[in-house]
Image (cartoon, rainbow, N blue to C red):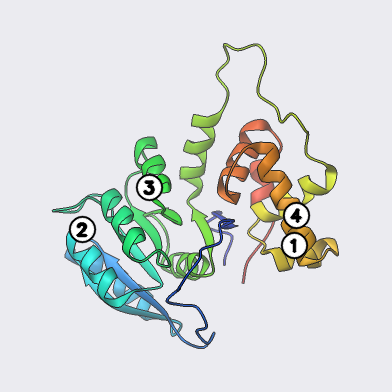
Protein backbone atom coordinates (compact mmCIF):
# COMPACT_ATOMS: atom_id res chain seq x y z
CA UNK A 1 0.00 0.00 0.00
CA UNK A 2 1.41 3.44 -0.85
CA UNK A 3 2.94 5.48 1.95
CA UNK A 4 0.90 8.60 1.09
CA UNK A 5 -1.80 7.52 3.53
CA UNK A 6 0.85 7.06 6.24
CA UNK A 7 -1.62 4.96 8.16
CA UNK A 8 -0.79 2.26 10.63
CA UNK A 9 -1.46 -1.32 9.66
CA UNK A 10 -1.21 -3.66 12.61
CA UNK A 11 -2.00 -7.33 12.78
CA UNK A 12 -4.84 -7.87 15.24
CA UNK A 13 -3.61 -10.04 18.07
CA UNK A 14 -6.86 -11.62 19.22
CA UNK A 15 -7.60 -14.94 17.53
CA UNK A 16 -11.24 -15.48 16.64
CA UNK A 17 -12.76 -18.87 17.36
CA UNK A 18 -15.38 -20.56 15.23
CA UNK A 19 -16.62 -20.17 11.69
CA UNK A 20 -15.26 -17.35 9.56
CA UNK A 21 -16.86 -16.37 6.27
CA UNK A 22 -13.47 -16.01 4.62
CA UNK A 23 -11.96 -19.10 6.24
CA UNK A 24 -10.66 -21.53 3.67
CA UNK A 25 -11.46 -19.11 0.85
CA UNK A 26 -9.10 -19.27 -2.08
CA UNK A 27 -6.84 -16.23 -2.33
CA UNK A 28 -8.15 -15.64 -5.86
CA UNK A 29 -11.67 -15.07 -4.56
CA UNK A 30 -12.67 -11.39 -4.20
CA UNK A 31 -13.16 -9.69 -0.84
CA UNK A 32 -16.90 -9.38 -0.20
CA UNK A 33 -17.80 -5.87 1.00
CA UNK A 34 -20.93 -4.05 2.11
CA UNK A 35 -21.23 -0.26 2.37
CA UNK A 36 -23.36 1.46 5.04
CA UNK A 37 -23.70 5.18 4.25
CA UNK A 38 -26.83 7.33 4.27
CA UNK A 39 -25.65 9.83 1.65
CA UNK A 40 -26.44 8.28 -1.71
CA UNK A 41 -23.75 10.12 -3.66
CA UNK A 42 -21.06 9.07 -1.17
CA UNK A 43 -22.30 5.48 -1.07
CA UNK A 44 -22.41 5.18 -4.85
CA UNK A 45 -19.04 6.88 -5.22
CA UNK A 46 -17.47 4.49 -2.72
CA UNK A 47 -18.94 1.55 -4.59
CA UNK A 48 -17.58 2.76 -7.92
CA UNK A 49 -14.12 3.23 -6.42
CA UNK A 50 -14.01 -0.26 -4.95
CA UNK A 51 -15.52 -2.00 -7.97
CA UNK A 52 -12.59 -0.75 -10.04
CA UNK A 53 -10.50 -3.41 -8.27
CA UNK A 54 -10.92 -7.02 -9.38
CA UNK A 55 -10.17 -8.42 -5.92
CA UNK A 56 -13.03 -6.49 -4.26
CA UNK A 57 -16.72 -7.29 -4.73
CA UNK A 58 -19.36 -4.95 -3.27
CA UNK A 59 -22.20 -7.33 -2.41
CA UNK A 60 -24.63 -4.85 -0.89
CA UNK A 61 -25.43 -1.33 0.28
CA UNK A 62 -27.39 0.08 3.20
CA UNK A 63 -28.70 3.61 3.75
CA UNK A 64 -29.22 3.30 7.51
CA UNK A 65 -27.78 1.44 10.49
CA UNK A 66 -30.57 -1.09 10.91
CA UNK A 67 -30.42 -2.01 7.23
CA UNK A 68 -26.65 -2.45 7.58
CA UNK A 69 -27.08 -4.95 10.40
CA UNK A 70 -29.72 -6.92 8.46
CA UNK A 71 -27.52 -6.92 5.38
CA UNK A 72 -24.48 -8.14 7.33
CA UNK A 73 -26.55 -10.97 8.80
CA UNK A 74 -27.85 -11.93 5.36
CA UNK A 75 -24.66 -11.86 3.27
CA UNK A 76 -21.97 -12.32 5.97
CA UNK A 77 -19.41 -10.03 4.26
CA UNK A 78 -15.67 -10.08 4.80
CA UNK A 79 -15.64 -6.30 5.34
CA UNK A 80 -18.35 -3.79 6.27
CA UNK A 81 -17.60 -0.12 5.54
CA UNK A 82 -19.65 1.92 8.01
CA UNK A 83 -20.27 5.64 8.51
CA UNK A 84 -20.98 7.25 11.89
CA UNK A 85 -24.07 9.39 11.38
CA UNK A 86 -26.82 7.19 9.95
CA UNK A 87 -30.61 7.14 10.43
CA UNK A 88 -32.37 4.62 12.72
CA UNK A 89 -29.13 3.26 14.17
CA UNK A 90 -25.83 5.09 14.49
CA UNK A 91 -22.59 3.59 13.24
CA UNK A 92 -21.30 2.74 16.71
CA UNK A 93 -24.30 0.61 17.63
CA UNK A 94 -24.43 -0.83 14.11
CA UNK A 95 -20.80 -1.91 14.50
CA UNK A 96 -21.55 -3.62 17.83
CA UNK A 97 -24.49 -5.52 16.34
CA UNK A 98 -22.63 -6.50 13.18
CA UNK A 99 -19.78 -7.92 15.28
CA UNK A 100 -22.29 -9.73 17.49
CA UNK A 101 -24.11 -11.48 14.63
CA UNK A 102 -21.09 -11.86 12.31
CA UNK A 103 -17.87 -11.82 14.39
CA UNK A 104 -15.72 -12.66 11.38
CA UNK A 105 -16.80 -9.50 9.52
CA UNK A 106 -14.21 -6.74 9.75
CA UNK A 107 -15.76 -3.31 10.25
CA UNK A 108 -13.95 -0.40 8.59
CA UNK A 109 -15.16 3.04 9.63
CA UNK A 110 -15.16 5.67 6.89
CA UNK A 111 -16.20 9.03 8.28
CA UNK A 112 -15.64 12.78 8.35
CA UNK A 113 -15.37 12.79 12.16
CA UNK A 114 -12.10 12.54 14.07
CA UNK A 115 -13.50 13.35 17.54
CA UNK A 116 -11.94 11.44 20.43
CA UNK A 117 -15.23 10.02 21.67
CA UNK A 118 -16.06 8.52 18.28
CA UNK A 119 -12.61 6.98 17.85
CA UNK A 120 -12.68 5.34 21.28
CA UNK A 121 -16.28 4.17 20.95
CA UNK A 122 -15.69 2.50 17.59
CA UNK A 123 -12.51 0.73 18.69
CA UNK A 124 -14.32 -0.51 21.80
CA UNK A 125 -17.24 -1.65 19.63
CA UNK A 126 -14.87 -3.88 17.66
CA UNK A 127 -14.03 -1.86 14.56
CA UNK A 128 -10.84 -3.02 12.79
CA UNK A 129 -10.15 0.30 11.11
CA UNK A 130 -10.95 4.00 11.22
CA UNK A 131 -10.39 6.18 8.16
CA UNK A 132 -11.37 9.74 7.36
CA UNK A 133 -13.17 10.56 4.11
CA UNK A 134 -10.12 12.46 2.90
CA UNK A 135 -8.61 9.07 2.02
CA UNK A 136 -7.79 8.39 -1.64
CA UNK A 137 -9.53 5.63 -3.55
CA UNK A 138 -6.49 3.35 -3.85
CA UNK A 139 -5.79 3.81 -0.16
CA UNK A 140 -9.35 2.85 0.73
CA UNK A 141 -8.98 -0.31 -1.38
CA UNK A 142 -5.70 -1.06 0.37
CA UNK A 143 -7.38 -0.58 3.75
CA UNK A 144 -10.14 -3.03 2.79
CA UNK A 145 -7.49 -5.62 1.91
CA UNK A 146 -5.63 -4.94 5.16
CA UNK A 147 -8.59 -5.37 7.51
CA UNK A 148 -9.65 -8.48 5.58
CA UNK A 149 -6.19 -9.93 6.33
CA UNK A 150 -6.83 -9.35 10.02
CA UNK A 151 -4.93 -6.10 10.32
CA UNK A 152 -6.09 -2.81 11.78
CA UNK A 153 -5.88 0.40 9.77
CA UNK A 154 -5.93 3.74 11.53
CA UNK A 155 -5.81 7.13 9.84
CA UNK A 156 -2.76 9.20 10.94
CA UNK A 157 -4.99 12.03 12.19
CA UNK A 158 -6.77 9.49 14.36
CA UNK A 159 -3.45 8.17 15.68
CA UNK A 160 -2.50 11.70 16.71
CA UNK A 161 -5.77 11.99 18.63
CA UNK A 162 -5.20 8.69 20.42
CA UNK A 163 -1.62 9.51 21.30
CA UNK A 164 -2.61 12.93 22.60
CA UNK A 165 -5.33 11.40 24.77
CA UNK A 166 -3.02 8.74 26.19
CA UNK A 167 -0.07 11.08 26.79
CA UNK A 168 0.57 11.38 30.55
CA UNK A 169 -0.68 14.58 32.18
CA UNK A 170 2.09 16.94 33.32
CA UNK A 171 0.92 16.99 36.94
CA UNK A 172 2.26 13.60 38.15
CA UNK A 173 6.04 13.79 38.68
CA UNK A 174 6.47 10.09 37.90
CA UNK A 175 5.29 8.74 34.55
CA UNK A 176 4.11 5.18 34.09
CA UNK A 177 6.72 2.83 32.73
CA UNK A 178 6.60 -0.95 32.29
CA UNK A 179 7.70 -2.76 35.44
CA UNK A 180 9.72 -5.03 33.18
CA UNK A 181 11.24 -2.90 30.37
CA UNK A 182 11.07 -4.16 26.80
CA UNK A 183 14.20 -5.91 25.61
CA UNK A 184 16.06 -4.71 22.53
CA UNK A 185 14.58 -7.60 20.55
CA UNK A 186 11.05 -6.80 21.74
CA UNK A 187 11.53 -3.18 20.69
CA UNK A 188 12.61 -4.38 17.24
CA UNK A 189 9.50 -6.55 16.96
CA UNK A 190 7.25 -3.68 18.12
CA UNK A 191 8.75 -1.29 15.55
CA UNK A 192 8.28 -3.76 12.71
CA UNK A 193 4.72 -4.52 13.85
CA UNK A 194 4.01 -0.78 13.86
CA UNK A 195 5.13 -0.64 10.23
CA UNK A 196 2.46 -3.17 9.29
CA UNK A 197 4.58 -6.31 8.94
CA UNK A 198 2.89 -9.64 9.60
CA UNK A 199 4.40 -12.17 12.01
CA UNK A 200 5.85 -14.04 9.04
CA UNK A 201 7.56 -10.94 7.64
CA UNK A 202 8.82 -9.90 11.07
CA UNK A 203 10.36 -13.35 11.45
CA UNK A 204 11.97 -13.10 8.03
CA UNK A 205 13.36 -9.65 8.79
CA UNK A 206 14.80 -10.67 12.19
CA UNK A 207 15.60 -14.31 11.28
CA UNK A 208 13.15 -15.64 13.86
CA UNK A 209 10.57 -18.41 13.74
CA UNK A 210 6.86 -17.58 13.61
CA UNK A 211 6.45 -19.01 17.12
CA UNK A 212 9.27 -16.84 18.49
CA UNK A 213 7.68 -13.71 17.02
CA UNK A 214 4.38 -14.65 18.67
CA UNK A 215 6.13 -15.07 22.02
CA UNK A 216 7.81 -11.69 21.71
CA UNK A 217 4.46 -10.04 20.94
CA UNK A 218 2.85 -11.79 23.89
CA UNK A 219 5.59 -10.47 26.19
CA UNK A 220 5.18 -6.98 24.75
CA UNK A 221 1.43 -7.03 25.42
CA UNK A 222 1.99 -8.22 29.00
CA UNK A 223 4.62 -5.60 29.75
CA UNK A 224 2.65 -2.72 28.25
CA UNK A 225 -0.62 -4.01 29.75
CA UNK A 226 -2.46 -4.01 26.42
CA UNK A 227 -4.50 -6.53 24.47
CA UNK A 228 -3.75 -5.76 20.83
CA UNK A 229 -1.10 -4.42 18.46
CA UNK A 230 -3.07 -1.22 17.97
CA UNK A 231 -2.98 -0.53 21.71
CA UNK A 232 0.68 -1.54 21.92
CA UNK A 233 1.72 0.92 19.23
CA UNK A 234 -0.37 3.76 20.63
CA UNK A 235 1.07 3.14 24.09
CA UNK A 236 4.55 2.80 22.64
CA UNK A 237 4.15 6.21 21.02
CA UNK A 238 2.86 7.81 24.20
CA UNK A 239 5.78 6.38 26.23
CA UNK A 240 8.41 7.38 23.72
CA UNK A 241 9.26 3.78 22.81
CA UNK A 242 8.21 4.54 19.24
CA UNK A 243 8.42 7.65 17.10
CA UNK A 244 6.02 8.62 14.33
CA UNK A 245 8.94 8.06 11.93
CA UNK A 246 8.98 4.40 13.00
CA UNK A 247 5.52 3.99 11.47
CA UNK A 248 6.45 5.26 8.01
CA UNK A 249 9.45 3.21 7.07
CA UNK A 250 7.58 0.24 5.61
CA UNK A 251 5.89 0.48 2.23
CA UNK A 252 3.37 -2.25 1.56
CA UNK A 253 2.69 -3.45 -1.93
Q: Which residue is mark 3?
A: 122
Query: Which label is found at residue 215?
Result: 4
Query: Which label is found at residue 202?
Result: 1
Q: Which residue is mark 2?
A: 65
Q: Residue at x 57, y 65 (%)?
A: 2
Q: Position of residue 168 (x, y in %)?
A: 58, 23
The mark that comes first in sequence, 1 or 3, is 3
Q: Could you say whether the residue bearing mark 4 is in a helix, strand or loop? A: helix
Judging depth in this view, the residue of 247 and 228 nearest the camera is 228
Q: Quadrant of the C terminus?
A: bottom right
Q: Residue at x 46, y 82 (%)?
A: 55
Q: CA distance from mark 3 to mark 4?
A: 28 Å
Q: Position of residue 77 (x, y in %)?
A: 36, 73
Q: Nearer the viewer, mark 3 or mark 4?
A: 4
Quadrant of res 31 = bottom left
Q: In the drawing, does residue 9 fall left or right of residue 129? A: right
Q: Residue at x 47, y 51 (%)?
A: 155
Q: In the drawing, does residue 134 fall left or right of residue 180? A: left
Asked if disc 3 and disc 4 are in contact, CB closer than 8 Å, the reply is: no
Amino acid sequence: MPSTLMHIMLVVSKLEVGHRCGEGKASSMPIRVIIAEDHTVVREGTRRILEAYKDIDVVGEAADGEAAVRLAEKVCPDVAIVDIAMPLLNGIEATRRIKAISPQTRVLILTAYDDDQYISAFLEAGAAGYLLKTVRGRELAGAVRAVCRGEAVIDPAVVAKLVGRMRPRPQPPIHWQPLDPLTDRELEVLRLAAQGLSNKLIGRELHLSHRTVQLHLSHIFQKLEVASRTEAVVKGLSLGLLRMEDLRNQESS
